Image (tube, rainbow, N blue to C red):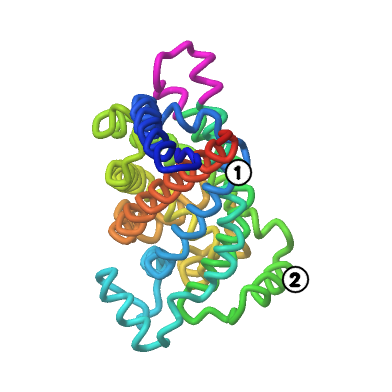
Amino acid sequence: MELRCGGVGSQAVGRGMEGDTREDAGSEDYENLPTSASLSTHMTAGAMAGILEHSVMYPIDSVKTRMQSLHPDPKAQYTSVYGALKKIVRTEGFWRPLRGINVMVTGAGPAHAMYFACYENMKRTLNDVFHHQGNSHLANGIAGSMATLLHDAVMNPAEVVKQRMQMYNSPHRSALSCIRTVWRTEGLGAFYRSYTTQLTMNIPFQSIHFITYEFLQEQVNPHREYNPQSHIISGGLAGAIAAAATTPLDVCKTLLNTQEHVALSLANVSGRLSGMANAFRTVYQLNGLPGYFKGVQARVIYQMPSTAISWSVYEFFKYFLTKHKLENRTPY
């Protein structure tokens, strides 16, 4: 921290003191620095992470939604993520993969703000309860699960609107028109029809995700310093492992969100499909065991950079905002 003193001699002394201060500060590891981080710091860093993550990866998310379709239109059948993206842009327009991004950004900001703030506070509290020196994997898993309850309560309606707009030949041209149509024809419950499935998927996903991330951080960044490369590697691998393991649940969630008419007709489902058990039966009836892993490639390709972006952005803003507040509180 710069010491602003008058005179050349004083500046030289100040620089010497500054070097000593930095050397002392360097002994304090990164994990200790944000312990004084406020709730607003966690929420701001989390919101920025969520918005950037979903904005950057949204085109891949659009492809993932379509590849998980149980009975896609012949014009919307894809063999690879890149091929799908190229075909969508060529046949439906350059901006088509981004349709619905506004509703996703609107939901991602507050959802991730609560998500990271809850995780950080629960993790710290549970580690104290377990009297664990350092990180407890059990504490990290429980904290991640609790954070998911808040996150999904905000994100589930956004997911419903987003996925309906992403589908091939979607009748919805704007998020607002989609919300109005779903509200008028299916009621408020439609926005939370897949909530239990979402939780059933995301609780194990986030438990695996957080436990893996914290474990990898212990391996590649044992001193828990601010190290962007370690956050990217740990975040990416954690996301990929968690995504592959929970793909069957994601396929069922997509079916509940989109209420894919052709697929439901082939399965002789009348009315609306609801409930995770019914979704599992319908997927198996239509595609057998391979149906549970439809779009697994797209899901891993989506989640790996998503979690890498999310963790690197979050850790950066947590570090930056905490350091900035500490500097402002330090008298010159």
For disc 1, the marked residue is 114
Task: Report if residue 211 is visible in the image.
Answer: no
Can residue 315 be seen in the rendering of this structure?
yes
Does 321 sit left or right of 31 as displayed? right
Where in the figure is residue 1, as x and y percent of width and height? Answer: 45, 38
x then y, percent, for residue 239: 35, 46
From the image, tell me which residue sits under label 2. Answer: 184
Q: Earlier in the sequence, mark 2 or mark 1?
A: 1
- Seen in the image, is 59 located left or right of residue 112? left
Along the viewing direction, whichever of 168 and 322 lies nearer the viewer: 322
Residue at position x 49%, y 72% in the image: 166
Q: Is residue 131 above or below residue 12?
A: above
Note whether 126 is above or below 219 in the view shown.
Answer: above
307 vs 21, nearest the viewer: 21
Name which residue lies at 47% across and 75% down: 98
Amino acid type for the residue under numbered disc 2: Arg
Residue 136: in magenta span: yes
Magenta segment range?
Answer: 124-140
